[in-house]
Image (tube, rainbow, N blue to C red):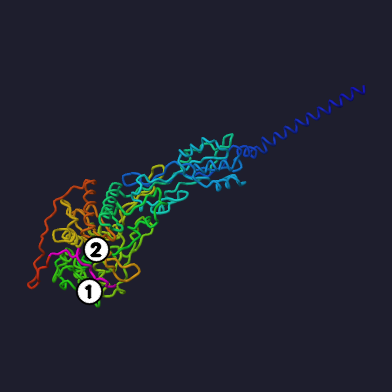
Amino acid sequence: MADDRHIKTRVVVIQVFLVGTLLLLGAKSFDIQILKAEVYSQRAENGYSRLLTIKGERGQILDRNLNKLGSSLDAITIIADPLRIEAPVKTARILSKLLKTDTKELAQKFSTDRRYALLAEAISPDMAEEIKKLHLPGIYFKKSFKRFYPNRDLAAQVLGFTGRNDIGREGLEFKYNTILDGKEVAVSVRKDGTGRLLDIDQKKQAELRGNTLVLTLDKKIQFLSEKTLEQTIKQHQAKSGLALVMRPATGEILAIAHYPRFNPNNYQEFHQSLFRNRAVTDAFEPGSTMKVFTAAAALDKGFTPTSIFFCENGKYRIGRYVVNDTHPHDWLSINQIITYSSNIGAVKISETIGRQTLHNCLTRFGFGSRTQVECPGETTGTLTPPSRWSDIDAGAISFGQGISVSAIQLISAISAIANNGQLMKPMLVKKIVSNTGKDIQVFFPTLVHQVISPGTASQIKHMMRLAVQEKGTGTKADLNGYAVCGKTGTAQKVEAGQKQYAKNKYMSVFAGFAPKKNPQLAILVVVDEPRKKYYGGDVAAPAFKTIMARSCNYLNIPPVTASLVAAAPPKMATGFQKAAAHDPDTKKPPFSPGDAL
């Protein structure tokens, strides 16, 4: 009996133990599966996933015809988990050969207690595949992008480039970085059994792509402008040059060419002085191209194209300075002053109309203020208040010395003459497009104001037409069938760090438009320090002609029959000697050598 009771007790104890165990297991199971389900689920997820920040592809930069100027290529970023690397030194030695990095530096990254180390960014998919085949523990791959400029150095100074982390550093890439930059988001990325990251959601990455910038530039006109400019610079052994093409009626910029250029795909190999968009950031003395604006000021003041001024037979003293004309002239009309590019004639106009009138006119044309073109670092140029002008300042400014302008200011002002006196805001960006293809913002031509009357603009056009014909200084710019209007400029450069002009350093300029009746294109060519020949009519005018001819051909702008213009000036009053036809813009500087301003 005692044994039976002992056995029953043991059975009861065991039953109680089993029931208690089952209750504990149930309670634990309830706790794990119900009360702490989210906690343990998160722990399990952490074992097979990782929170990773991904960034979308940078938006494209396109020309007006949607040709790619700046885009992105697939690239790979290599990262490491140092705690999973089994042989740090060996792994560093293998990778350093492929990535062309320092072995010791890599080994140090692998020897830390951190779980993340960046090894290389923006490597090619082929290189990544080669490393993947090595099956190195602790080495992972993340998809990224690399900025690419398919046309190499085309419009490089305008586009700029991106640096580390695909952030814009120069040009439009810098100016519109927030628009172009892809968005970032933290996502949970799955890992396989070995800890390798599985593919990131491609759809999610596509949604993060940056916006696209559509420009007014025309890839083909940009290309032919750059090639023509390059040939001109090399032919004349010049220091550098610019060429701009604009639609006068809209202000749209079709080309901004620089020489020398650089390749933004490997910008590190070039000197940073080449990076800036000098058409916007740099100012220069425009020389005789300024005379058309002086003439415009006179016409708006009430003078006529046949109003005459005594030109002092080639030399005119202002205080201790002497202003020179290449060939002596006595009486010249405003038409002839522009045709023959008389410095003294421009000075006489300035003295007659007064400083304030000239300053007001130049200001209305946009000189001395920014055009607000969509480029960083725009200069205002230099146009001092008339109250600070000396007599020689007022005279020099009338023919383009003692004033500095940017190329974008000058072509905008010339375009205003072509556009019946209406100054348009220069336009470089047409629209911004979202990553889904919808227009976010569309830009339209913007009228700044009416600078001069349509009648005055028509009279200035006529003068500029005379300037490229038989007796003018810009005959090498004339183009059969297109009635070119233009003006040459040859400006002495100020000696660096001094207040006097250098003897053998010049800026050669030609600015104009065509056709005269309905101008379709305005073009500016600026050549810095050409050797041997340095006159605007010899250096810049032929380049203008080439760019104009090829652009008209490409755009299918038909030639028109040029209206005949009388070669002889109107008859003057008795006693006025008929002016001799010479080319003063190609013989003698406006100041005697060494004259200071």
Magenta-tinted stretch: 581-597
Mark closer to the chain start, 1 or 2? 1
How many marks the image carries: the answer is: 2
In this rendering, the answer to whether 49 lies above or below 569 is: above
Identify the residue under disc 1.
322
The amino acid on which the numbered mark 1 sits, given as a three-letter code, is Val
- The picture places residue 456, in percent across and down from the top left corner, at 20, 63
Residue 80 place in picture, x, y as percent: 56, 43
* The quarter of the displayed image where residue 486 is located: bottom left
Residue 407 x %, y %: 30, 59
Q: In the visual, does 349 lie left or right of 127?
A: left
**Residue depicted at 75% across the width and 33% down the height:** 24
Q: Nearer the viewer, residue 53 or 402?
A: 402
Depth check: 60 or 34 in front? 60
Q: CA distance from mark 1 to mark 2?
A: 18 Å
Asked whether 25 falls inside the magenta stretch, the response is no
Residue at mark 2: 490
**Residue drawn at 13 percent across, 71 percent down:** 331
Q: Residues within 10 Å of mark 2 (few under 14, many from 20)?
A: many
Considering only vertical position in the picture, is 487 above or below 351? Answer: above
Q: Residue furthest left?
A: 574
Q: Position of residue 274 (x, y in %)?
A: 37, 56
